[in-house]
Amino acid sequence: MTFARLVLAASTYEPVPEPRTTHLPVESTARTLVQFYETTVLPLYPAFPGTSLHALVSDIYQEHPRPIRSSEYWMFWMVLAIGSAAQSRNRQDEHYLNAVEFVARALPHADRALKPGYVTQVQSLLLLTQYSMLDPAHFDSWHPIGFTCRAVVDQGLHQDPPQAQQVDQDVLDARRRTFYCVYALDRSVLGSHLVLGHALTLWLCRAISMAHARAFSFYDDAVSVALPSPGQPGGTLAGGQITKPIPDASVSLFRLRQLQSDWYQMLYQGNPTEPLPDATSFIWQKYYEMWEWSERLPTDVPVAIREMLDLELRYSYVYCVASSARGAQVSAYGRLLIFEHAISYMDRIYDIANLTTNTALYTYHDALRVFFMGSQFVAVLRDAGDLLLSGSPIPIPPSVPGKVSPPPQPVRLDRGTGDNLDRSLRCLERVKLTLRLYGHRWKDALSLMESFDTISAEVWKNLSARRAMRNAHAAGHWQPAPGA
C-alpha cells in the first residue's frame, strides 16, 4: 500500500475506466489545453510557472524526448484533464470524456508523483484536487485537499524559512505560491450553514473545509508565510520566445482567503455556547475589509476572472452576514444586504452558466454556492418577506461612536426589471434554472435542484399568489373577499 494508493483509495468514488489508447494526443490539442489551463487556472493557483508546462510539452513531443519523470507525466496528463473538464458543458460531451481519458493516462504515474517528501508531491496533489472539483462523479475533493495540507505541514511549507537562512527571492516566492495555492483551496468557501426556517443548518456533502464546517487542516495562528510577490515568473513560450506574462490574480485571491478564514474561524469555529462580544461590529468590520479588498483589485485582472472574484465577494458578504452560532441575530438591514447580494449573484451566475463557452474555472462547487445563495434568499424572504417586498426603505442602522459603521446599501444592478416581488420570483427561478444547467455537467446538481424545489416551494407559492393578486388589482379585476 503506497501513499498514492492510499490517497486514491480514499478519494475515488467510481473507478476511472482504463485508457482507450496509448498514443499521445495531437500536439496542437495538448498545447490548446495547456494554454486554457494557463489562462484560467494559473492566474489563481500558480503552483508552477506556465513556461515549465510549455517546455514540458515540447520535451514530450520531441522525436527523441529526454527521460521524462513520473511527476512530469502526471503534471502533463492532469493539466490536460483539468483543461478539458473545465470546458465541458455536459457529462457526455467530448471535453469530459477526453478529461477522463487523460486522468486514466495519469494514474499509472501516481506512485512516484505522489511520493512524500518532495514539492512535486504537493503540486501533484493540488492537480488531483483541482480535477476532483470538476469531476465529482469519480473523485471526492475532501480527501485530496486534506492530504495536500498534510504534505504542506510535513514539509514545513506553512512556515517561512528563518531569516538567518539566505534564500533566493525567486525560490522563496515559488515556495510561498505553492503554500498559498494549498491554503486558498483549503479555505474555499463552498457553501454550508444554510439558514432555513428556524435557523436549521444543513450539511452539504462532497466539499472542502468550509462546506462541511470542519476544522481547517491548519489554523491561521500556525501559519507564518508572507504573501508572495505579485506576478508569475516568465510567460508563454511562443516560437522559443518568452511573451508577456499573463496577469496574475493569485495574490488577490490569497488575500481574500485570509479575510474569509479570519471571520469564518471566529464565527463558525469558536465555542458556540459563547456569543461573540459585539458581534455586529465584528461583522461590519469584516464586511468593510472585504469591500476594501475589492477596491484594490489590480486593474489588469482579466474580465472573466474579475467576474469570478466579484461573485466570490458577494458570496462572502452573504456568508459573513448570515446567522451563525456566535453572531448576532440578523437585523432587517442585514437581511436587505443578503437580499440584494443574492439577487446580483444569481443574475450574474445565471448568465455565466448560459454562456456557450467556459471562460473561467467554474466547478461543481459553484453549484453548491448557487444552492447556498438560493437557500439564504429563501430564508430572508421567510423571515422578512413583507418588509422586503413592500419596497419601503430600510434605513441603515445609526453609527455608534468608536464602532464600525454599517456598510452602505449595495448598488442595484437590475434597475428597470420590476419591483422586489418580480425580482424575487426571477431570482428563485434562476436558482433552479442554473442548477438544472449545472445538472448537465454534474449529476449531483440535479439533487441540489430538487432539494431547493422542496425548501422554496412555500415561498414560491406565496410570491406567485401575491403577484396574481397585484396583477388582478392593476387590471381592475380585483374584488374584496365577501365581508371584507
Image: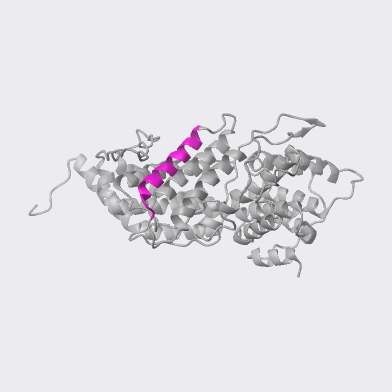
Quadrant, the N terminus:
bottom right
Name the image quarter holding residue 140: bottom right
Q: From the viewer's perspective, is 454 left or right of 394?
A: right
Q: From the viewer's perspective, is 437 left or right of 51?
A: left
Query: Residue most toward the left?
Result: 483
Seen from the viewer's position, the closer of residues 444 and 207 is 207
Which contiguous range is marked in magenta?
276-295
Q: Residue 132, relative to residue 387: is it above or below?
A: below
Q: x, y percentage for residue 299?
A: 56, 29
Q: Is residue 436 visible?
A: no
Q: x, y percentage for residue 21?
A: 80, 56
User: Looking at the image, which residue is at 57% across and 37% down?
Assistant: 304
User: Does 292 appear in magenta?
Assistant: yes
User: Looking at the image, which residue is at 55% across and 61% down?
Assistant: 206
Q: How is the image coloured?
A: one colour
Q: Residue 237, relative to residue 473: is it above or below?
A: above
